Image (spheres, grey):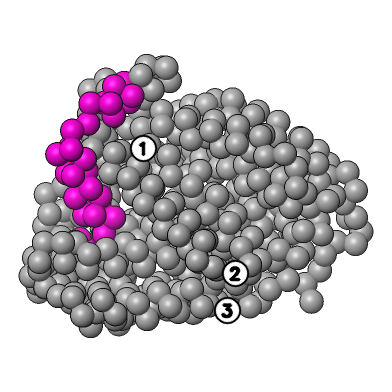
Amino acid sequence: MYRLVTSLNPLEELYAYLVLGMIIRLLWNRGVPPVFLFISAIHWLQIYMFLVWNNFYGWRVNTYYSTGGDAFWLSMTGVGLMTLIFHQILKKTAWANADTFNKESFHFSSVPVFWAYIFLTVFNGVLFQWAVTIPSIGQILFWMIDLREVMLLFYAWLVMVKKEPKWGLIFLCLIHFVLSLTSYFGGYKSVFILLALLIAMRIRYVNLFRMVAVIMGLAFFLFLSSIWLSVRNEYRIFLNRGTKMQVVKVSRQESLQQLYLLVSHITPHQLYKGFENMIYRIQYLQYFSLAMQRVPNMIPYQQGNLTLSNLEFVLVPRILDPDKPTLDASRKTIRYTGAQVATAQEGTSISMGYFVDFYIDFGSIGMFFPLILFWLLIGWSYQYFVRHLSFSVTLNAMVMMIFLKRFYLFETDAIGMIGGLYTMLITLVLLRWFLMPVLMRLFSYKLPHAKRVQPA
């Protein structure tokens, strides 16, 4: 109520809160894997922060971008539709819940899961090198790298359900956090995301203590994000040795020492600029707003040509098209928004967000049809593989939570979304045929395969 009274954009704030209430009401159910809650909530956050950013500077929603309001209403409506679709998927997979996971968990041993995480941590460096040097299978290998997070989430679940000592879990979380700091993209947030998914699935009710704990946790995470954005550019230059490539050319010890040096010398002004940058960085409606200024006034709707081009890029393998260019979303962003952004040659790639691709093709109303189809495909993938990936619904759900959380960013390019879904399905099929039977034998010791949990 305070925000509605004091905001310069009260109607937009009210609509955002209504959509948020719908997300919580429909997607946060006790014991249900919260990956769809996570996807919808982060989409909502990146759109809502556009209002926070405007209020921060004392602007109306259309002050800085004349079409900012239109972009907001369309995007927030899309998140509402996404929530309704995911809700229907969860209703059809209601049998995949904490009650089922709890029963299965006592048929697993946490010790081999612990060592599987350690092995993958060591071996992922090799997988990453293969993914970079073998582009034809690189995307599949990147999905395989995500199995390390699956092991961490699965181990955390087993430890909590079986009430085992937490020292092993704390040790793995620290390893995960520290090693993530040495990556080019600073994946420090991944361990927080994993723990948030676990807690959201385990929590039975909300009280004042838990609400305060959540607020303090979010404040700490925002503080870390402000620090990271304060030192990110200088740190990345050190990591890639000034090559403007998204690679790490120094040892982990050197990278951690440099990060400590940069953080220890942060000034209050740098921290404030980092916080200011964080607000702008989280919101992602600027390119949608700019695209709406140019399309269709200066550039006509593409009538599906952009989507067909994206599909061709994804589906035609590099083996059949040796001249296939590397993905550079910045070129598309420059063309349709007019914004002068850094390109892949300058060491980065700036996307418009996948909502914008479909708007450019089909307009304000037509954009929702391909979006709905895409969200249905994500939901159907979850529905199928949580049942059929292996004999264990628990392990299936852990894999799907980690894999599907890749689709959480509103800002992701359409090629990234479509290509991610395509390669994820291929990877899941390969996992089902080759790796999951091995993992089941390794992790379980009393799992009744013949009495596999079936949906009601």
Are the residues flagged by discs 2 and 1 in contact, CB closer than 8 Å?
Answer: no
For the question of whether residue 293 can be seen, the reply is yes
Q: Is residue 269 above or below residue 69?
A: above
Other residues around mark 1 within 10 Å, as few (<14) / some (14–19) / many (≥20): few
Q: Quadrant of the C terminus?
A: bottom right
User: Which residue has dot 1 on it?
Assistant: 185
Q: Residue at x 39, y 48 (%)?
A: 221
Mark 3 lies on a secondary structure that is: helix
Which secondary structure class fits the magenta region best? Answer: helix
In the image, taking residue 109 as reference, residue 147 lies left or right, namely left
- Labels 2, 1: front one: 2
User: Which residue has dot 2 on it?
Assistant: 205
Which of the numbered marks, if any, corresponds to residue 319? none
Q: Which x, y percent locates residue 414?
A: 36, 59
Mark 1 lies on a secondary structure that is: loop
Q: Residue at x 43, y 20 (%)?
A: 252
Separation (CA) of disc 2 from disc 1: 35 Å
Reading the chain from its start, which is encountered first: label 2 or label 1? 1
User: Which residue has dot 3 on it?
Assistant: 88
Q: Residue at x 29, y 80 (%)?
A: 1
Q: Which x, y percent locates residue 326?
A: 33, 41
Which range is magenta? 258-287
Separation (CA) of disc 3 from disc 1: 34 Å
